[in-house]
Image (cartoon, rainbow, N blue to C red):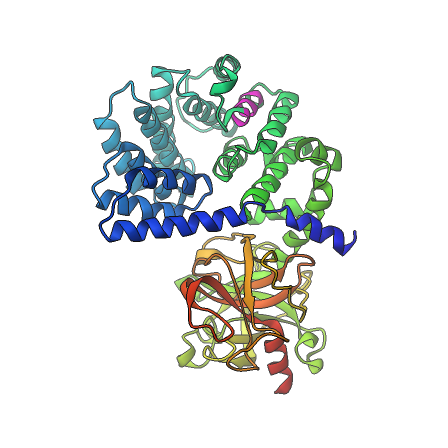
Amino acid sequence: MSQTGVIIDQAEVSPAAAERHSLRSSAHALIDKLKRGQPDFDEGLRVAHQLRETREFDLLDELTDQLRRAGEDNPTIRRLEAQSFIERGKAIPALDILESSAARLDKDSKEWGEAHGLMGRAWKQIFFDTEDKTSPQARKALANSMREYAIPYSADPAENVWQGLHLLALANFVQAQGLPIDAAIDSERLARDIVSILAAKPEAERDNWYHGSLAEAHLALNDLDAAEDNIKAYVRDPKTTAFALGGTLRQFTDLWLLDKKGDREYGIVQSLRAALMKKHGDLELSPEQLQRALGDRPPDEQLESILGPDWPKTYRWFEVGLKSGRAVGVISQGELGRIGSGFLVKGADFKAGWGDELFVLTNAHVVSNDPNDGGIPPQEACIKFEAADKDKSYDIDSIMWISGKNRLDAVILRLTEPVKDIPPLRTTTLLPLLDGKQRVYIIGYPGGGELSISFQDNILLDHEGPPEGTPVDAGVRHLQYRTPTEGGSSGSPVFNASTWKVIALHHAGGQSIRRLNGRIEQWPANEGIWIKSIIDAARKE
């Protein structure tokens, strides 16, 4: 496959990036207006819906909070605020909001059904967050979830189809897992009822979930042909949002367990993941999911059938990124938890005398023997490459080279034992053109949480590379790219879009980062250190 072909494919991986940036700017401007006492509730509701559909949950939380502070008590705003809580792992605060809303709403209102459905979603999240799925706590959460989904569906099946679908998925999950939950539900009858309801819906009233819902109902009937046909329509429909794709993908993996079934079911899951990445530029995989993704790929015929004729080539580009994720590790400090990311590099790429030995590159503010850097001492640090082996941990032997937080913010670490069977990441000193269209990608552990291989979709904003770059210090050149990442992404590799080679070490991000090349303005951005600056400095010592 030619590199030119890869670049062409990459251009279509996330076509909505510019629109997302515009939406973020609008949301920040609206939040500022609300803080100044200038409420605009109609615009607030419109932007809040858009933030949900593009999975901008941090901004959705901030906007809905400001709307409520300004006096807006619309039940839809409360629901969207609860949605942001659920999506960010805060199920209990979401339940508090939703229970209050449901108690005040008329049972004939749409928001009453939505509130109960989201309570089902919150309880379901509590169930999945519980380590022992057979514990009384887990059983209670699962039973509560099924009860909340059943309430609105039983009241009005035609108006509350999605709640019925979630009830159907949970019933099948309980049966498949042999869980001790009393769920007297005729799954086949429920699935056929839902198919009938959806089939009777006039075309003008079919929302962006329509084909995804039909696909799920047909899964319950073991009709993979119909499920695939509807997924094809779903992922190709421009109205299908990242939020919808993410919800369907979660259902298909968490409850229907399609990624643990046959090749055809797995192909549906991978097609949804590819569609989500194209729409959103962000994809999260567990260690087990990543390992299967690297071992099994959907047949080209299935990818073409569902996603379109160009996707087999694009999927191969996607696979290169997945393989790169194996070399990215999470750095922890004993029992105190995860503090950042780091990645494997070949010693000779930084110093000829280091040969083929593999080292870890991360930030000095993550690991350092200088208290001024704010990193943990190397003897207290360990790293896991969870995409390769989630149980294997490597201790740090020593610091091979370091440049402090206030200079290159980089450190190269030797491990106490060699890493086997994980290729190091490839580096390049070539920087992308500054044409406003180039993207860079970060793979790391955002938030310091469980493994999250995230392809953060970042437009390259600026860099200080030659010949036009004018850095303050010629030995420390930076790149800036759109979308601040979460804490915990520190030490992640920054890749170019065409060849998945490392061009920078990610080290900072925020809403007010000073611009590069002598400009005094600030803007929301990520920032990384050019890998060539790090290589040049290491070779001089």
Magenta-drawn stretch contains 508: no
Instruction: Decide if residue 457 is on the left or right side of residue 49.
Output: right
Q: Nearer the viewer, residue 539 or 41?
A: 41
Magenta stretch, main secondary structure, is helix
Task: Please tell me which residue is depicted at 30% across the width and 41% down the height of the picture.
Answer: 92
Q: How many marks?
A: 0
Magenta-drawn stretch contains 214: yes
Image coords of residue 205 (percent x, y)? 47, 20
Task: Please tell me which residue is depicted at 57% across the width and 71% down the height of the picture.
Answer: 361
Residue segment shown in magenta: 211-218
Image coords of residue 484 (percent x, y)? 45, 58
- Looking at this view, name the residue that lies furthest to the right: 1
Task: Please tell me which residue is depicted at 46% across the width and 70% down the height of the picture.
Answer: 366
Task: Please tell me which residue is depicted at 73% across the width and 45% down the height of the picture.
Answer: 313
The answer to whether one can see residue 262 in this image is: yes
Instruction: Decide if residue 415 is on the left or right side of residue 178.
Output: right
The answer to whether one can see residue 282 in this image is: no
Q: Nearer the viewer, residue 134 or 518?
A: 518
State which quadrant residue 387 falls in: bottom right
